Image (cartoon, grey):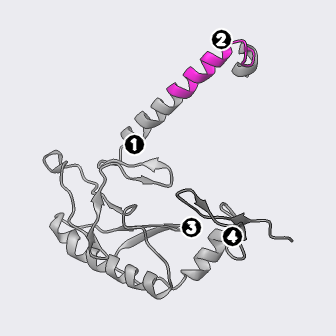
Amino acid sequence: MVNLRRFRVHIGDDVSYWRRQANGLLQASVLAPTLFNQYTNDLPVTHSCRFIYVDDICCALQAETFSDIECPLTVELAHLAKYCQLWRLKPSTPKTVTSVFHLHNNRSRCELNVHMNGQRLKHDPYPVYLGVTLDRTLSCTEHLSRSTAKLKSRNNLIAKLAGSLRGASASTLHT
């Protein structure tokens, strides 16, 4: 199989020559998740419950109070960061967030003070994991409202196309 992938770099008005990409896998390659799982098969044992899908790792801890979670979670992330550094993986601190799931309305604005690689992690009250938007009560309300908004905008677009001369006929769009 011939490698036809190539790249070049743009900096301002300057552009480099085309170069061939000699390593790595294509985005969305079916082999990539399997190889990543093999590569990270020796993740360090931690006290958190981990949910792993391809290169997304979610660490979950349960405690009586939010302050009981902050220190252990920071320690767990330090272990994972050390592992990543050893194997030349780069966790994205800006994309890593903390969230809390609970039913206490008076604590609804609570944010965890958790650090990774010396940076405090951003709090996200509505994290998205594997395409599902979570909320603090795990009721899926936020996910459903976001899905509804997407659906309405797409339906509006289809309705406009059906009413124009450039789009498909209404019966085709309906099908």
Amino acid type at image mark 4: Leu
Q: CA distance from mark 3 to mark 1?
A: 23 Å
Front label number (4 vs 3): 4
Find the distance from the CA under tag 3 to the CA under tag 2: 43 Å
Q: CA distance from mark 2 to mark 1?
A: 34 Å
Return the disc, 3 or 1, that comes first in the chain's sequence: 3
Which of marks 2 and 4 precedes in the sequence? 4
Measuring from the top left, give residue 48's x and y in whole percent.
35, 74
Say whether marks 4 and 2 touch (CB < 8 Å): no
The count of marks equals 4
Report the residue marked by disc 1: 140
Q: Position of residue 113 (x, y in %)?
A: 20, 66
The residue beneath circle 4 is 25
Per the image, label 1 sits on a secondary structure element best described as loop
- To which quarter of the image does residue 96 belong? bottom left
Q: Nearer the viewer, mark 3 or mark 2?
A: 2
Q: Residues within 10 Å of mark 4 (few under 14, many from 20)?
A: few
**What residue is at 64 percent from the left and 76 percent from the top?**
35
Closer to the camera in the image, 31 or 95: 95
Name the chief secondary structure element in magenta. helix
Calculate the distance from the C-alpha at mark 4 to the C-alpha at mark 2.
43 Å
Q: Which mark is residue 163?
A: 2
Residue 172: % across, % down: 76, 19
**Callouts 2 and 1 close, C-beta under 8 Å:** no
Give the foreground label among 3 and 1: 3
User: CA–CA distance between discs 4 and 1?
Assistant: 35 Å
Residue type at tag 3:
Val
Discs 4, 3 touching: Cβ within 8 Å: no
The region drawn magenta spans: 152-169
The mark lying in front, picked from 4 and 1, is 4
Task: Classify residue 15 as left or right of residue 175.
Answer: left
